[in-house]
Image: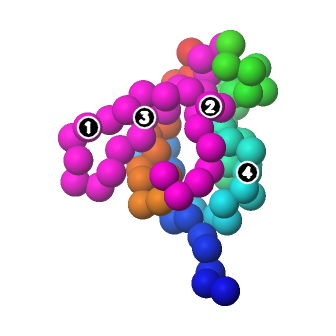
């Protein structure tokens, strides 16, 4: 059986962190970010989609297109492979 992992990059405070996870290892992108970076104030509503403190932008290397999303609504699956997740310096 092939090693099924997802590689992505978390960009926060001008630093990149490469992350390798298995599909289904995290319930959502929000929980992955909270576990990997422990950002104060990130995801205050615990994934209910009601506070907006987990807004991130998703892009690909070399692309100028950035998609703003609530990280609590994004599944950690193959669609995140090789993506860059831009996390704002300030959580509102």
Is the Cβ of the residue at disc 3 closer than 8 Å to that at disc 2? Answer: no
Q: Is residue 86 above or below residue 1?
A: above
Label located before the other in sequence (1 or 2): 1
Is the Cβ of the residue at disc 3 closer than 8 Å to that at disc 4? Answer: no
Q: Position of residue 37 (x, y in %)?
A: 65, 47
Work out whether residue 23 can be spotted. Answer: yes
* Residue sitting nearer the eye, 19 or 26: 26
The label nearer to you, 3 versus 4, is 4
- The residues tagged by marks 2 and 4 sit, at their Cα atoms, a distance apart of 12 Å
Q: Position of residue 44 (x, y in %)?
A: 74, 22
- The residues tagged by marks 1 and 2 sit, at their Cα atoms, a distance apart of 19 Å
- Residue found 59% across the figure and 38% down from its top: 74
Q: Position of residue 70 (x, y in %)?
A: 56, 27
Q: Residue furthest front?
A: 1
Decide if residue 24 is on the left or right side of residue 3: right
- For label 1, the SS is loop
């Amino acid at each position: 059986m092939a090693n099924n992992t997802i590689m992505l990059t978390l960009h926060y405070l001008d630093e990149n962190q490469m992350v390798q996870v298995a599909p289904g290892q995290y319930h959502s992108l929000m929980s992955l970010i909270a576990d990997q970076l422990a950002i104060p104030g990130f995801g205050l509503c615990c994934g209910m989609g009601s506070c907006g403190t987990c807004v991130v932008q998703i892009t690909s290397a070399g692309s100028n297109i950035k998609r703003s999303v609530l990280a609590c609504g994004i599944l950690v699956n193959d669609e995140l492979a090789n993506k860059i997740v831009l996390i704002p310096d300030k959580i509102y």
